[in-house]
Image (cartoon, helix red, strand yellow):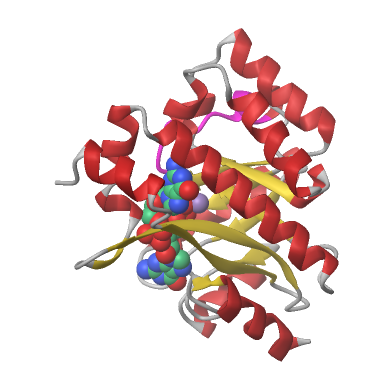
Amino acid sequence: VQTREALALALQQQAFELHYQPQLDLRTGAVIGVEALLRWQRPGVGLVLPDAFIDVAEDSGLIEPIGAWVLEQACRQAAAWRAAGWPSLVMSVNLSAVQFQHGQLVETVAAALANSGLAPQGLELELTESIVLQEDAALRETLAQWKCQGIGLAIDDFGTGYASFAYLKRFHIDRLKIDRSFVSDLQSDDGSRAIVAAIIQMARSLGLRIIAEGVETLAIAAQLQGMGCDAVQGYLYARPMPAPELERWLQARD
Ligand code: G
Ligand code: G
Ligand code: MN
Ligand code: NA
């Protein structure tokens, strides 16, 4: 169990870092963006993944300053990469429901964009279904504001929560990320195949873009393409990597 104190110290000592996983256009192979994934370089322990500390960060309120750091860092990195030869790269940043509860998130996002100089079109925010299910007026206002500024909105882990067609339209969602549990079972499980097919069809009829997460084999990629999926992310293409490594990966593909 990670204590609040250890996380507070990590923040203070700048022990958090972001790794970046590429997202590709399935048809052309072009890199369309990267997802920022939080890691903690814990002294004496090594690299700690978010599943081990996000809950504590949320319960202790530290997710707010940590989340603000993530947004700032991710936007700066995206601005640098867009200026360095990948002008259409979009940075996806994960948000947790708790970050919406304190009323500072709009300002935090605006500050990250302003301080980095990143165009709003270069940022996509990944929301969970639990966030959009809250249905309150403040949330609706927040998402409408981001949408209006040109920030992209995606639903992460789509299909695992209480997916509702209604909120997809109401909140002007741009993109669905098909949860990797369905993607990895695509070949072996008829149920998963039916779910993925239904999600893709629904997305198309609503004019939403789709990305499949957790693509690990060429066979799955080919099957997704046949099903009309636009974009992919997964170990088949690249694991999440520190910035310098991701940059070399991008250069090698150019
Ligand atoms: O590689 P991976 O173990 O990074 O990610 C595990 C989970 O942690 C994912 O569900 C992801 O959404 C979440 N996560 C990763 N980075 C962040 C972050 O910066 N903020 C929040 N709230 N969640 C994150
Ligand atoms: O935010 P989200 O829940 O989508 O987090 C993505 C998670 O999936 C991260 O933990 C990331 O490291 C992980 N991931 C990315 N690609 C793959 C993959 O191909 N296979 C598996 N098993 N995990 C992946
Ligand atoms: Mn995500
Ligand atoms: Na996911």
Q: In this orientation, does residue 191 appear? A: no
Which image quadrant for residue 57?
top left
In the figure, residue 168 lies in which quadrant?
top right
State the residue in front, 246 or 33: 246
Q: For residue 60, which quarter of the picture?
A: top left
Residue range highlighted in magenta: 160-168
* Residue 211 higher or lower than 221, as above or below: above
Q: Is residue 160 left or right of residue 73?
A: left
What residue appears at the point 54 percent right and 26 percent down from the top-left corner? 132
Q: Is residue 156 visible?
A: yes
Residue 1 lies in the magenta stretch: no
Q: Position of residue 71 (x, y in %)?
A: 59, 44
- Residue 209 at x, y = what percent? 71, 50
Relative to residue 29, is residue 10 depicted above or below?
Answer: above
Q: Nearer the viewer, residue 189 or 120?
A: 120
What residue lies at 84% left-to-right and 66% top-to-bottom? 83
Q: How many marks?
A: 0
Between residue 163 and residue 32, name the one nearer to us: 32
Task: Answer above or below: position of 242 versus 94.
Answer: below
Question: Residue at point 77% right, 31% down?
Answer: 147
Hey, which residue is sitting farthest bottom in the picture? 252
Residue 129 locus on image (x, y percent): 48, 33
Q: Is residue 162 magenta?
A: yes
* Residue 84 relative to residue 99: left or right: right
